[in-house]
Image: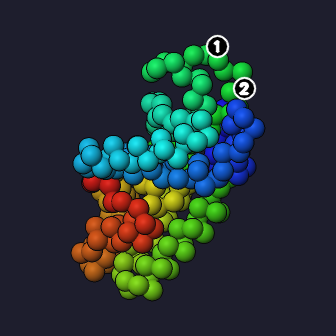
Amino acid sequence: MSDASTDGNEQTDENGAELPAEVLEETERLTRLARKAAIEDERDAYLRRRAEILEPHEFVARVREETDGDVLVIHPAQWHDGEVIRTDRIEDVSRAVEVRLEGAGDPDDWETVDAENRALVEEIRENHGTVHAENATAFADFMGNHYARPMASATDAEITEFLEEYFVRNAWPSKAQRAVIEESIELVFETAGESVPDV
């Protein structure tokens, strides 16, 4: 199956129409928001919106649980028969797109991810000052080097790992940094336009 990060900017549906890159990106964004939502009604709203943007292309999305992290799978609706995927209806598995929601990203994308994270750090520096920017820099180092993913894609478990292990052992934070680290993490997500996970 194809991976959204390596499969180019579009995916073709059964009618030859393209599944635009912005649809793939919005599907992933809504899935991550649904996973982070603390309120069930909010989660359901994200999932309904996800279904709405995929329906015109006759695609659906589901999350497959794996031992090394959940995977978002976007595939043609015709593959489904109720809750079951009919393997006899699958002629070309490359029509599905997979996006890993947890764990490490693609190391080949590290430079792109790092550039995005550093740009976010500078935006925080400009709007919220040096101390928050230093904390964001430490978080960027952690997410980039350990997971090769954007800071704002961090899960609650990854944030906890950063706060309890990486930050105290590897970042050498000042007293001022330690005092505002949780606020700094919130600013990372808010600046990126994402919801803050419950940690």
Dot 1: within a 10 Å radius of its alpha carbon, few (fewer than 14), some, or many (20 or more) residues?
few
* Disc number for residue 169: none
Residue 129 location (% of width, % of height)? 38, 86
Name above or below for residue 87 compared with residue 61: above
The residue most toward the top is 88
Residue sticking out furthest to the right? 16
Q: Position of residue 149 (x, y in %)?
A: 53, 55
Q: SS of the residue at dot 1?
A: helix
- Residue displayed at 36% across by 78% down: 132
Residue 115 visible in the displayed image: yes
**Looking at this view, is 130 or 87 the one in front?**
87
Q: Which residue is mark 1?
A: 88
Q: Please, is residue 94 above or below residue 164 in the view?
A: above
Along the line of sight, the residue nearer the viewer: 73 or 16: 16
State left or right for residue 40 relative to residue 134.
left
Amino acid type of the residue that numbered disc 1 sits on in the rendered structure: Asp
Q: Which image quadrant: the N terminus? A: top right
Q: Is residue 114 left or right of residue 52?
A: right
Tag on residue 92? 2
For the point 29% across and 71% down, the residue is 183
